């Protein structure tokens, strides 16, 4: 059956000499894997730009029930990026976000509310007016809301991440900034010291690993820490 849908590229792997298998989170069909033949050939290399992490696509796809691999009939960019591919901080953040999504969303998982949030968050990442330092923290917190395990406040969050530490005075500054972002996730006016951002990011990664059994090591985390 042929279907139209929007998609967000999570990642791809090389397949044979000139093809790829792309994992794409679609609005209507969920997370799907698509084989794209010949896209790495000399004549088609320009089309590889369509399958970079977090690229927003309009798709016409063949969707077969219970098929582990499907095919794309038509593909075009929904919104060409102006900054993400050309800004090392934004591109590094995009790789991190794509890796997080790849570890958090399972095959065929469909959630149009999560899709719409991610879609708008990617558009925001490509804009000038954004607090890039806080963006990964805000993204992780908001995504956890759609995945069903968002903390209600900083105290609850730190009790789960650091259960052995019960002192009320522990991480006072971290808790204060955490609550700020929890209440206004992408507010560009929120200022957080770099060392606190790194601690919050590490704690959020641990928080995800507590709530998602399949959540494994995030390889792009070290790169993002250096950027922060």
Image (tube, helix red, strand yellow):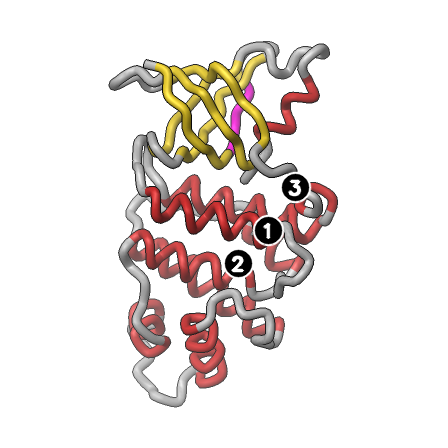
Locate residue 62 relative to residue 193 in the image: left or right: left
Q: Is residue 105 above or below residue 207?
A: above
Within-10-Å neighbours for mark 1: few <14, some 14–19, many 20+: many
Magenta portion: prevailing SS class? strand
Q: Quadrant of the N terminus?
A: top left
Proximity of marks 1 and 2: CB atoms separated by less than 8 Å? yes
Q: Is residue 53 magenta?
A: no
Bounds of the magenta segment:
10-14
Within-10-Å neighbours for mark 2: few <14, some 14–19, many 20+: many
Element class at badge 3: loop
Query: On the image, numbered disc 1 is attached to which residue?
Result: 93
Query: On the image, numbered disc 2 is attached to which residue?
Result: 136
Proximity of marks 3 and 2: CB atoms separated by less than 8 Å? no
**N-term-proximal mark, 3 vs 2:** 3
**N-term-proximal mark, 3 vs 1:** 3
- The quarter holding residue 211 reads bottom left
User: What percent of the width, then of the height, locates residue 143?
Assistant: 39, 54
Looking at the image, the residue that sits furthest to the bottom is 169
Query: On the image, numbered disc 3 is attached to which residue?
Result: 81
* Mark in front: 3 vs 1: 3
């Amino acid at each position: 059956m042929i279907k139209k849908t929007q998609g967000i590229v999570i990642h791809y792997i090389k397949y044979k000499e000139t093809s790829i298998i792309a994992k794409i989170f679609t609005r209507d069909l969920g997370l799907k894997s698509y084989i794209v033949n010949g896209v790495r050939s000399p004549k088609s290399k320009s089309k590889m730009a369509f399958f970079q992490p977090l690229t927003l696509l309009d798709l016409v796809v063949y969707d077969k029930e219970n098929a582990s691999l499907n095919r794309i009939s038509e593909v075009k960019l929904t919104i060409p990026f102006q900054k993400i591919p050309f800004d090392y901080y934004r591109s590094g953040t995009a790789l991190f976000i794509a890796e997080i999504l790849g570890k958090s969303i399972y095959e065929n998982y469909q959630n149009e509310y999560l899709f719409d949030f991610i879609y708008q968050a990617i558009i925001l990442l490509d804009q000038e007016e954004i607090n890039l330092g806080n963006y990964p923290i805000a993204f992780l917190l908001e995504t956890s809301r759609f995945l069903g395990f968002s903390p209600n406040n900083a105290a609850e969050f730190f009790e789960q991440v650091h259960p052995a530490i019960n002192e009320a005075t522990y991480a006072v500054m971290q808790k204060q900034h955490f609550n700020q972002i929890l209440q206004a996730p992408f507010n560009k006016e929120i200022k957080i010291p770099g060392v606190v951002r790194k601690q919050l990011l590490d704690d959020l990664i641990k928080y995800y690993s507590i709530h998602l059994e399949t959540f494994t090591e995030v390889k792009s985390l070290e790169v993002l820490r250096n950027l922060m």
